[in-house]
Structure formats: structure tokens, C-alpha cells
Amino acid sequence: MEKIKSKYFVEGPISPQAIADSIAKHSTKTNIGAHSIFLGQVRKDIVNGKNVQAIEYSAYSEMAENEFHKIREAAFAKFDLICMHLYHSIGRVKAGEINMFIFVSSKHRKDAFEACREVVEQVKNQVPVFGKEIFEDESYVWKENN
Amino acid sequence: MKIRITAFGYIAEIVKRSTFELESATDLNTLRKKLEEKFPEIKKHPYKIALNRELVNDNRIIEEDSEIALLPPFAGG
């Protein structure tokens, strides 16, 4: 089980087991009919001929907490949702490991699908998380979202 | 009034620390100019300013207890 740094940040990669456990915890919420889950995984990109072996994430955590909260509140206001969990990694996450877990639940699938997609885009645009793409020789470049 | 600033990502690398102080700057435009004077390399790298944990693009007055952060492009998700 990861050491949770905050409500939204997790130290290191998010394990598949933690994701499975989170799904299992929702089986008591029997008003839920749909879960929409998005997982961000670190991709082994090639930059200037070098392979990315990991991304090291850092954040302006006070502002990031605010932004996660705002994104959550906005989604609950706009969509008919029952539950939502947002998690992002801090620290080093290797290629192939999970760095973001967005989990949205609703009565019906339309709200879950739409809310999940919107939340993912907002997290990428609004939350002050920074990333170093670390190459196999431990050199790095700073990552920028498109 | 000294301004306390927190820097992240490549901005922290340019200024060589994650928190530092600047001599008085009454508003954000002046702050930007002073940063460029003190750290000329910053001109080559886009960054945004967060004032009290909110991104601001326009000019704002800097109050006594303002929290200022210099943020490079985001890479979350």
C-alpha cells in the first residue's frame, strides 16, 4: 500500500493492487451502476534518440490540492456523480508504471464517461505538477504537456 | 518590502534554489522585470506566476503577505 502524502498525491507509482482495492471498496455502494476509470502510465518515449526510463514528478502541492478540489467540485456540480477519487504520483515513476488514477462513479454510464474525460483533461491543464523525463543514463529533460 | 518567491522545475534550476527573496516589487510586471535582470536566463524559458495559489496573467499589486510561485509548464497526468 502506498504511503499517501495527501488526499491526492501518492509517493511513487500507483500499484495495480491499490486500484483493484479501490474498486472492491465500492461494491457496498449499490446505487452505483457505472465506474469510469482512467489510468495514466509512464510511456517509454524517445527524446533526442534517448529512451525515457522514468519520470520524476514534483508539485506546488498547496496550489495543486486547491486545483484538485476545484476540479472535483466542478465535476459534481456538472454531472450526476456518486463518487470520485483522484490520485497522482509524486517522486519517481518508471516507464510502464501508473502515475495517475482517476476513478469516477455514477448511477448511469453517460455521466461517468463524460465526467472522467473532462476531469482528466482538467488535471493535465490545471494542476501544477512538474515532471523530469529521466533517460537511461540518468540525464533528463523537463516534460511539458501538450 | 521583501518578496518571498518559490520556484519549481527548470525555474528553480535557473535561480539555483527553490525559495528566495527579491527586493521590493510592488506589482507583478515589476517583479517580472527584476527577475529578468537578476536571472537573464529566465527570458529563454516560459513560466507563469501564481499569486496566492492562483495563476495570474495580468498585472497585480503585490501585498505584504503575498505567496508567489514561479511555475514552468505543467506535466501532470
Image: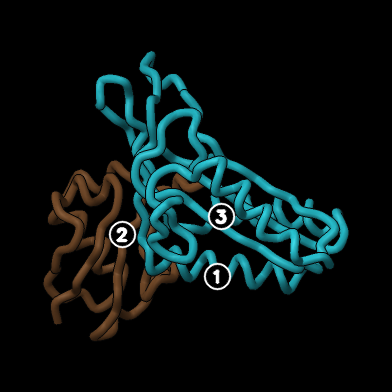
Q: Which mark is residue A21?
A: none
For numbered disc 2, what is the local secondary structure? strand
Foreground: B18 or A90? A90
Q: Along the horizontal axis of the image, is A106 left or right of A63?
A: right
Question: What x and y, as percent, mark residue B63?
Answer: 28, 84
Question: What x and y, as percent, mark residue A26?
Answer: 71, 60
Indicate which label's residue lies in the foreground, 2 or 3.
3
* Identity of the residue furthest to the top in this view: A49
Q: Quadrant of residue B27?
A: bottom left
Residue that mark 2 sits on: B70
Foreground: A98 or B34? A98
Residue that mark 1 sits on: A69
In the image, the chain rendered in cyan is A
In the image, the chain rendered in brown is B
Mark 2 belongs to chain:
B
Question: What x and y, as percent, mark residue B36?
Answer: 21, 54
Instruction: Using a 10 Å C-alpha cutoff, classify the residue at mark 2 as few (fewer than 14 neighbours), some (14 to 19) or many (20 or more).
Output: many
Quadrant of the drawing holding the C terminus of chain A: top right
